[in-house]
Image (cartoon, rainbow, N blue to C red):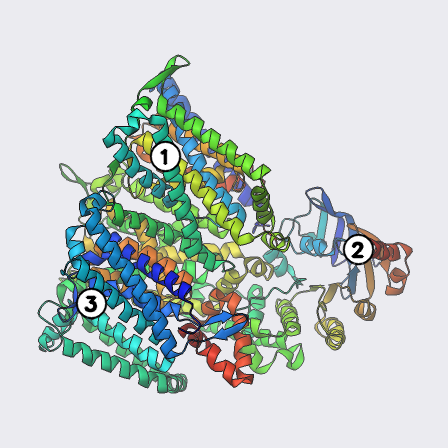
C-alpha cells in the first residue's frame, strides 16, 4: 500500500519518461555501434570486466539484502565493513609479499587473506550492530537511518585516522598475474578467480539459508520477528548472525576487490556500498538470488552503459560519468520497478 | 563496591581502555597533545586520556536491576567501583603503551600510522614506560572514582559540576576568539588567558565557580523565571519583541568584536545555518530524510554565479560560460530560490512515492550525480568542470562590498533571520500541521484528507529554496567556485547540524551550526577530524539523545515513542509512592528534562 | 430500495491478496441518512471493504460509486475531501499532536491556506485558522465533556483508550463528511462506554445529519442503531435486511457457528 496519488497524469508522465529514456538509449547505442568506436575485443573486455565487477557487487549486496530482509533497514555502513576487511587483509598480504610467502604458497596465503578479511569484516559488522543499531530497535525509522549514515562516515574516517589517507598498493600472488586464453581472447586470471569465488560464496550462502537451522531461524525472523520470537527463536542472536554473515561475504569481496584494483584506501567503501545497494535494489531487495542477479546486471550496465550510450552522443570522457550512471540506474529502478527484477514490490501493512 | 560486581567493573574498564586506545590510534590524542586548555599542564590531549576512564567510572556505577530489585550504589560504593574500573582502564592502557614500546613503534606504525615515538612520549608523560604506566593507572583510578562519585551524587551536586567543567573547557577551547574580542573592548586578555594558550589556572577556577553557581541558581529558580517570562511575554508582546531585539543587537555587534578571521568562520556558520534551516523543513518538519541536500547548495551557488555574470576558470584564463546573464545579486537570489523550489519539485515528484529509506538513498544518489556533473568534462562549458568558476558578484550595494568577512556576516544574518522567520511561521500553521501529521503517520494523514504528495513536494520545494539561497550566499562569500566545495560531506554536515540541535528545532539548528561549524573552524586542529566528529555526532545523538540538544517538544515525545508511555506510568507511580519517585525521576538527566 | 441514487454503491467489487479473495463480487448500497451495519465473522472482508471504499486499496474488479460517481483510483485524501470519513479498527491517531490538533487535522481538507498564508498571515488566513480551531472544538464537543477543556491541549497518547477512540471519531467528524465509516468503534470499550457510544452513533445521524456505515461485532449495538444490516462472509453478501431478519437468517447463523466451530 504505498501509492498516494492515482491520477492518470502520473502514469502518462512515467510512460513518456520511459519512452524518452528508451529512445535515448537506442539512439546512443545505435550511433556508437555504427560509428564503430570500440572493437569487438573491447566489447568483450567490457563484458568480462563488468561481470567480475558485478560479482563483487553481488557479494556486498548480499549484506544489504540480508540485513534489510531481517530488520527492514538499510545498513549504510556496510561499505565500510567491506573496507575494513580489505584493509586487514592488506597488512597480511603486504607482509607475505615482503617475505615471499605470497608467491611461494599462493593458495595458502590466499586462504589466510580471505580468513583474515572475513573475520575482520564480520567483527566490525557485529560491533556495529551491537553499538549503533541494537539500542535503536523499535525506534522511528528515521533514527536508525541517520545512525547508519553517521556510522558510515565514522568508520571511514576511523580507517583514515588509523591507516592514513593515502591509498596503499595491494599485491596479488604472481600466479594470478597475466591471463588465460579463453573463447579466443585473453581473460585476466584474476577476473576468473573473482567470478568463481563469488559464485561459490553465493551458492554456499543459499545452501546455508535453505538447509540449516540457523538459516531457518533467519527466514522466520525475516517473515515476522515477533512471531518468531514467540516461537522460541532467539531474535537478537539471529540478527547478530545476519550481520556476521553479511560481514563474511563483504570480507571475501574486500579481498577480491583489492586484488582486482591492486589498492586499498579508506574511502573505497562508499562507492562500493552505493553500487552494491543499487545492485540489491535492482535485483529485488531481500532476495539472495536478486542480489546475485542485481550485482551482475549492474556490473554489466556500468561497464557497457556509458561507453555504449554516451559515446554515441560524443560526450567527452564517458567513464567519468560512470558513478552518475549507477545512481541514475538506481533512481530509474525505484521509479519504474521498486520491487526490482525479482521482487514483487514492497507492500506495507496498514 | 555494592551492586557493581568485580566482573562487570573489569569489563567496563576494558571498554574504557578500548576508548583510550581508539582515541590514541585514530590520532586525536596526539593531535591535541599541545592544545593547552587550562594552565600549561591541562591540554585537550591529556583530557582525552582521562575522559574514557571517567566515563567508565560514571557508567559502571549506574543503578542495576538485580532479580527484579533496583539497586543504587551509594556514594562510597560508586566511587570505589568507578575507581576500580577506571584503574583497570588506565592500567591496561598503560600496559598497552609499554607493549608498544617493547614491540617496536616502527613495526606498529606499518599498520597504525599514528603510533609514533612522540605519541609514546606524550602518553608516558615523558617519564619513561614504567613511570608512565603508574601515572596512567593512577589517573585512571582518580578519573574513574570521580566518575563513579558523580553518578552516585544527587543531580543537585552533579549538574553544577558538569556544567562548570564543560563551560571551563569550552572557554579554554575558545582561546582564539575571546582574547581577540577582549582586546577590541580594551580589556586585557591576560586576566583570563595565558598568551596564545588556554585559561590561566585562577581564571579557570573563577569560571568554574561562576558557571556552577549560575547553574545552581538556575536549577533553583529557573523554572519560575521562565514561567514568569512566558506569562509576561504573552501578556505584553513588547517584552518578546524586546528580547528578540536584544538578541539581534548582540548578533550584529559580534563581527565588530571578533575581527576578520573569526568573522570569516562565522560567515561559514551562517551559511550552514541556512542549510540546516532548509534541511530542517525537509527532515525535521516533513520527516523526509534527504541525503542529497548538497544538490540544492550546488545549484544555488552555480545558478547565482551564472546569473550574475561569473566567468569560467580555464588553463588559459577566464572564459565566458555557455550561458550567462548579468543580473544584480538581489534579483538573482530570488530567481535562484524559485528555480531551486522548482528543482525540488522535479526531483521530488518521481521519488516521493518511495518509502523513507529508499528516499534517503535516492536523494543521496541525486546529490552525487550533481557533484559528479559539476566536475565532469561534459558540463565544463557551463560550470567550468574541475577548474570551476570565478568572478561571482560581491553583492555590493553602492560602495559596500559584501565579500569582506565582516560585511558578509550581515548579509548572511539577514537571510538567516528571514529563514528563521519562515520556518517559525510555517511550523505553526496549517501547512506545519499537515507536515506534522504526515510525519507521524503518513497513511493516516492521507486518509484524513492531506495530500501527502503535495506536502512532500512542498517540503522539498521550501527546503530546496532555502538550501539554494545558502549556496548563493556561499558563492558570494568565496567569490569563486570549485567542485571540491560541493561534495556529499555538505549534505552530511547539514544533517549533523540539524540532528545535533534537535530535529524540528529552530534554536537547535542555530546551536548545531555554531558547535559543528564554528568550533572546528576556530580550532584548525580539528580540521582533519571533522568528518569523524560529524559521523560520531550523528551516531551518538541518535543512540543517546535522539531529540537533540535543544529539542522541539513534540519531537522529543515522538523520538521516545517507546518510552513515553512508560514514563507517564512511572511519573504517575511517582506521585503515588514518594520513595519510588526519587529513584526513578532522579535517575538520569534525560528523564528529568523529559518531564519538564 | 428507493429510486434515488444511493449515497454509496459497491458494484461487484472484488479484491484479492495473492490467492486469497477478501472480497469476491460484493454488491451493496448505503442510502443517505441511513445507519447501515456490516457484520460477519473475522476475515469476512469487512475491513477490506472499508479500505476499498476509502481508497486505501484499489479493487481488482467492480466499481465503487459515491453520489453516483466512481471513486475508484482516487487517493484516500481525495475521497475524504469528497465526503467519506473513517476510523480504523486499531486506533490510529497522531499520538504526539495534541487532542485539538488531531481534530484540526481533520479540518485540513475544508481549508486552503498554503505557504504564502502561513508566512505572511493575512487576515484571511487568520480567520481561516480561527474557523479551523472553532470547528475542531465543535467536533470534539460532540462527545460532551469527554474531550473538552484541558484535555484538548494534552498529547493524544495521554488519552485513555476509550477517549482515543472518541478522538478518532471526532477527527473524522471534523472532516465534515457526508458518510462516516466506523470500523468496530466499540472494540475494547467497557459496557457503559459501549452504551454511551451507541447513543453517539445515533446522534451522528440525528444531530449532524451523517450517514453512518458501521462495522460492529457487538450485536447489542448493531441491534440498537441499525436501519439495515448487511452480513458478509467470504467476501460476499450473504444476507441483508433489518436486524431481526439478518439475525435469523440460517446462512448467517451458520457462518458464525461455522467459524466458531472451526476456531
**Residue C263, numbered label:** 2
Left or right of residue B276: residue B208: left
Instruction: Quickly name the residue at label 1.
Output: A112
Packing grade of label 3 (10 A; few <14, some 14-19, many >=20) is: many
Residue B179 x, y percent position in the rendering:
13, 71
- Residue drawn at x 43%, y 27% is A195
Q: Residues within 10 Å of mark 1 (few under 14, many from 20)?
A: some
Q: Nearer the viewer, mark 1 or mark 2?
A: 1
**Mark 2 in CB contact with mark 3 (< 8 angstroms):** no
Whether residue B521 is situated above or below residue B425 in the rendered picture: above
Which secondary structure lies at badge 3? helix
Q: Which chain letter matches label 2? A: C
CA distance for labels 1 and 3? 47 Å
> Where residue B446 sits in the image (x, y, percent)?
57, 58
Q: CA distance from mark 2 to mark 3?
A: 70 Å
Residue linked to disc 3: B173
Seen from the viewer's position, the closer of residues C51 and B168 is: B168
Estimate the spatial distance between the alpha carbons at disc 1 and disc 2, rounded to whole Å.
58 Å
Instruction: Say whether mark 3 and mark 2 are on the same chain.
Output: no
Q: Label 1: state its secondary structure.
A: helix
Chain letter behind tag 1: A
Which of the 4 image quarters holds residue C81? bottom right
Subunit that carries the residue with mark 3 = B
Q: Quadrant of the C terminus of chain C?
A: bottom right
Q: Residue at x 47, y 48 (%)?
A: B358
Amino acid at each position: 500500500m504505498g501509492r498516494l496519488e492515482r491520477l492518470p497524469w502520473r502514469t502518462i508522465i512515467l510512460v513518456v519518461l520511459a519512452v524518452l529514456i528508451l529512445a535515448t538509449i537506442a539512439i546512443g547505442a545505435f550511433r556508437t555501434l555504427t560509428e564503430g568506436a570500440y572493437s569487438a575485443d573491447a566489447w568483450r573486455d567490457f563484458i568480462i570486466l563488468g561481470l567480475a565487477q558485478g560479482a563483487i557487487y553481488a557479494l556486498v549486496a548480499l549484506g544489504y539484502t540480508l540485513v534489510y530482509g531481517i530488520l527492514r533497514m538499510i545498513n549504510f555502513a556496510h561499505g565500510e565493513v567491506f573496507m575494513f576487511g580489505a584493509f586487514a587483509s592488506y597488512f597480511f598480504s603486504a607482509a607475505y609479499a615482503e617475505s615471499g610467502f605470497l608467491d611461494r604458497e599462493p593458495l595458502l596465503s590466499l586462504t589466510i587473506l580471505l580468513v583474515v578479511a572475513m573475520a575482520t569484516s564480520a567483527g566490525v559488522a557485529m560491533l556495529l550492530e551491537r553499538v549503533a543499531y541494537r539500542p535503536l530497535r523499535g525506534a522511528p525509522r528515521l533514527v536508525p537511518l541517520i545512525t547508519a549514515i553517521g556510522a558510515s562516515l565514522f568508520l571511514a574516517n576511523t580507517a583514515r585516522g588509523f591507516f592514513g589517507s593515502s591509498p596503499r598498493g595491494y599485491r596479488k600472488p604472481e600466479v594470478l598475474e597475466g591471463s588465460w586464453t579463453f573463447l579466443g581472447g585473453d581473460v585476466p586470471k584474476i577476473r576468473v578467480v573473482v567470478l568463481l569465488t563469488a559464485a561459490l560464496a553465493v551458492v554456499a550462502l543459499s545452501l546455508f539459508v535453505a538447509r540449516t537451522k540457523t538459516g531457518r531461524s533467519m527466514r522466520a525472523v525475516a517473515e515476522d520477528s515477533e512471531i518468531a520470537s514467540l516461537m522460541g527463536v532467539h531474535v537478537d542472536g539471529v540478527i547478530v548472525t545476519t550481520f556476521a554473515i553479511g560481514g563474511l561475504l563483504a570480507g571475501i569481496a574486500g579481498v577480491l576487490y583489492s586484488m582486482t584494483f591492486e589498492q586499498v584506501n579508506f574511502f573505497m567503501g562508499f562507492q562500493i556500498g552505493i553500487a552494491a545497494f543499487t545492485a540489491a535494489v535492482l535485483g529485488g531487495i531481500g532476495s539472495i538470488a536478486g542480489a546475485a542477479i542485481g550485482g551482475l546486471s549492474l556490473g554489466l550496465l556500468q561497464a557497457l552503459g556509458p561507453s555504449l550510450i554516451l559515446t554515441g552522443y560524443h560526450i567527452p570522457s564517458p567513464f567519468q560519468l560512470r558513478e552518475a550512471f549507477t545512481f541514475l540506474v538506481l533512481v530509474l529502478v525505484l521509479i519504474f520497478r521498486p520491487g526490482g527484477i525479482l521482487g514483487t514490490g514492497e507492500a506495507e501493512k496498514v | 563496591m555494592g551492586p557493581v560486581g568485580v566482573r562487570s567493573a573489569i569489563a567496563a574498564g576494558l571498554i574504557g581502555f578500548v576508548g583510550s586506545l581508539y582515541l590514541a590510534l585514530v590520532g586525536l590524542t596526539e593531535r591535541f597533545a599541545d592544545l593547552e586548555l587550562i594552565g600549561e599542564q591541562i591540554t585537550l590531549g591529556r583530557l582525552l586520556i582521562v575522559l574514557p576512564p571517567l566515563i567508565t567510572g560514571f557508567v559502571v556505577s549506574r543503578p542495576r536491576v538485580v532479580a527484579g530489585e533496583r539497586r543504587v550504589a551509594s556514594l562510597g560504593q560508586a566511587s570505589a567501583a568507578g575507581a576500580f574500573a577506571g584503574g583497570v582502564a588506565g592500567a591496561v592502557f598503560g600496559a598497552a603503551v609499554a607493549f608498544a614500546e617493547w614491540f617496536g613503534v616502527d613495526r606498529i606504525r606499518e599498520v597504525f600510522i599514528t603510533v609514533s615515538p612522540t605519541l609514546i612520549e606524550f602518553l608516558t608523560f615523558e617519564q619513561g614506560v614504567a613511570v608512565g604506566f603508574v601515572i596512567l593507572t593512577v589517573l585512571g583510578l582518580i578519573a574513574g572514582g570521580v566518575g563513579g562519585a558523580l553518578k552516585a551524587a544527587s543531580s543537585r551536586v552533579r549538574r553544577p559540576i558538569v556544567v562548570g567543567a564543560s563551560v571551563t573547557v569550552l572557554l579554554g577551547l575558545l582561546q582564539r576568539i575571546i582574547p581577540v574580542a577582549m582586546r577590541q573592548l580594551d580589556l586585557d586578555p591576560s586576566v583570563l588567558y595565558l598568551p596564545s594558550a588556554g585559561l590561566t589556572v585562577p581564571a579557570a577556577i573563577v569560571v568554574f565557580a561562576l558557571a556552577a553557581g549560575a547553574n545552581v541558581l538556575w536549577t533553583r529558580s529557573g523554572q519560575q523565571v521562565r514561567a514568569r517570562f512566558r506569562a509576561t511575554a504573552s501578556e505584553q508582546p513588547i517584552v518578546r519583541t524586546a528580547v528578540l531585539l536584544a538578541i539581534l543587537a548582540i548578533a550584529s555587534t559580534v563581527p565588530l568584536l571578533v575581527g576578520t578571521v573569526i568573522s570569516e568562520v562565522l560567515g561559514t556558520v551562517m551559511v550552514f545555518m541556512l542549510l540546516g534551516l532548509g534541511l530542517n523543513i525537509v527532515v525535521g518538519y516533513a520527516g523526509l530524510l534527504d541525503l542529497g541536500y548538497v544538490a540544492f547548495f550546488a545549484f544555488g551557488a552555480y545558478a547565482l554565479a551564472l546569473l550574475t555574470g561569473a566567468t569560467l576558470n580555464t588553463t588559459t584564463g577566464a572564459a565566458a560560460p555557455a550561458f550567462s546573464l548579468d543580473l544584480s545579486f538581489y534579483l538573482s537570489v530570488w530567481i535562484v530560490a524559485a528555480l531551486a523550489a522548482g528543482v525540488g519539485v522535479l526531483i521530488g515528484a518521481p521519488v516521493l512515492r518511495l518509502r523513507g529509506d529508499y528516499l534517503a538513498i535516492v536523494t543521496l544518489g541525486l546529490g552525487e550525480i550533481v557533484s559528479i556533473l559539476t566536475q565532469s568534462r561534459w558540463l565544463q562549458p557551463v560550470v567550468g568542470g574541475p577548474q570551476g568558476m570565478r568572478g561571482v558578484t560581491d553583492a555590493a550595494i553602492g560602495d559596500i562590498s559584501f565579500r569582506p568577512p565582516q560585511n558578509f556576516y550581515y548579509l548572511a544574518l539577514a537571510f538567516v533571520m528571514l529563514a528563521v522567520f519562515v520556518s517559525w511561521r510555517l511550523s505553526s500553521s496549517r501547512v506545519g500541521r499537515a507536515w506534522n501529521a504526515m510525519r507521524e503517520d503518513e497513511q493516516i494523514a492521507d486518509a484524513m484528507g492531506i495530500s501527502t504528495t503535495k506536502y512532500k513536494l512542498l517540503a522539498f520545494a521550501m527546503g530546496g529554496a532555502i538550501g539554494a539561497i545558502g549556496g548563493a550566499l556561499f558563492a558570494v562569500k568565496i567569490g569563486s567556485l570549485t567542485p571540491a566545495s560541493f561534495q556529499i560531506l555538505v549534505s552530511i554536515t547539514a544533517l549533523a547540524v540539524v540532528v545535533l540541535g534537535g530535529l524540528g528545532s529552530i534554536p537547535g539548528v542555530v546551536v548545531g551550526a555554531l558547535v559543528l561549524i564554528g568550533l572546528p573552524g576556530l580550532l584548525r586542529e580539528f580540521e582533519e577530524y571533522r568528518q569523524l566528529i560529524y559521523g560520531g555526532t550523528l551516531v551518538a545523538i541518535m543512540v543517546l539523545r535522539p531529540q537533540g540538544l535543544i529539542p522541539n517538544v513534540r519531537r522529543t515525545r515522538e523520538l521516545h515513542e517507546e518510552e513515553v508511555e512508560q514514563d507517564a506510568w512511572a511519573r504517575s507511580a511517582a506521585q503515588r509512592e514518594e520513595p519510588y519517585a526519587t529513584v526513578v525521576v532522579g535517575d538520569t538527566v534525560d528523564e528529568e528534562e523529559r518531564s519538564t | 430500495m428507493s429510486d434515488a441514487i444511493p449515497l454509496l454503491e459497491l458494484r461487484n467489487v472484488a479484491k484479492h491478496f495473492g490467492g486469497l479473495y477478501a472480497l469476491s463480487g460484493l454488491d451493496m448500497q448505503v442510502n443517505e441518512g441511513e445507519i447501515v451495519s456490516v457484520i460477519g465473522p473475522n476475515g469476512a472482508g469487512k475491513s477490506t471493504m472499508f479500505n476499498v471504499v476509502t481508497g486505501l486499496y484499489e479493487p481488482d474488479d467492480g466499481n465503487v460509486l459515491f453520489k453516483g460517481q466512481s471513486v475508484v483510483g482516487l487517493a484516500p485524501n481525495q475521497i475524504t475531501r469528497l465526503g467519506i470519513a473513517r476510523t480504523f479498527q486499531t486506533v490510529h491517531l497522531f499520538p504526539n499532536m495534541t487532542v485539538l490538533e488531531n481534530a484540526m487535522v481533520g479540518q485540513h481538507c475544508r481549508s486552503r491556506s498554503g505557504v504564502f498564508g502561513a508566512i505572511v498571515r493575512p487576515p484571511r488566513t487568520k480567520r481561516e485558522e480561527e474557523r479551523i480551531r472553532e470547528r475542531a472544538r465543535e467536533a470534539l464537543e460532540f462527545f460532551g465533556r469527554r474531550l473538552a477543556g484541558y484535555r484538548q491541549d494534552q498529547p493524544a497518547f495521554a488519552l485513555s483508550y476509550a477517549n482515543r477512540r472518541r478522538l478518532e471519531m471526532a477527527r473524522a467528524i471534523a472532516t465534515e463528511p457526508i458518510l462516516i465509516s466506523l470500523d468496530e468503534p466499540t472494540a475494547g470499550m467497557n459496557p457503559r462506554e459501549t452504551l454511551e457510544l451507541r447513543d453517539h452513533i445515533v446522534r451522528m445521524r440525528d444531530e449532524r445529519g451523517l450517514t453512518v456505515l458501521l462495522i460492529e461485532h457487538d450485536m447489542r449495538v448493531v441491534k440498537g442503531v441499525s436501519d439495515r444490516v448487511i452480513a458478509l462472509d467470504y467476501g460476499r453478501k450473504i444476507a441483508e435486511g433489518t436486524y431481526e431478519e439478518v439475525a435469523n437468517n440460517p446462512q448467517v447463523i451458520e457462518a458464525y457457528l461455522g467459524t466458531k466451530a472451526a476456531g
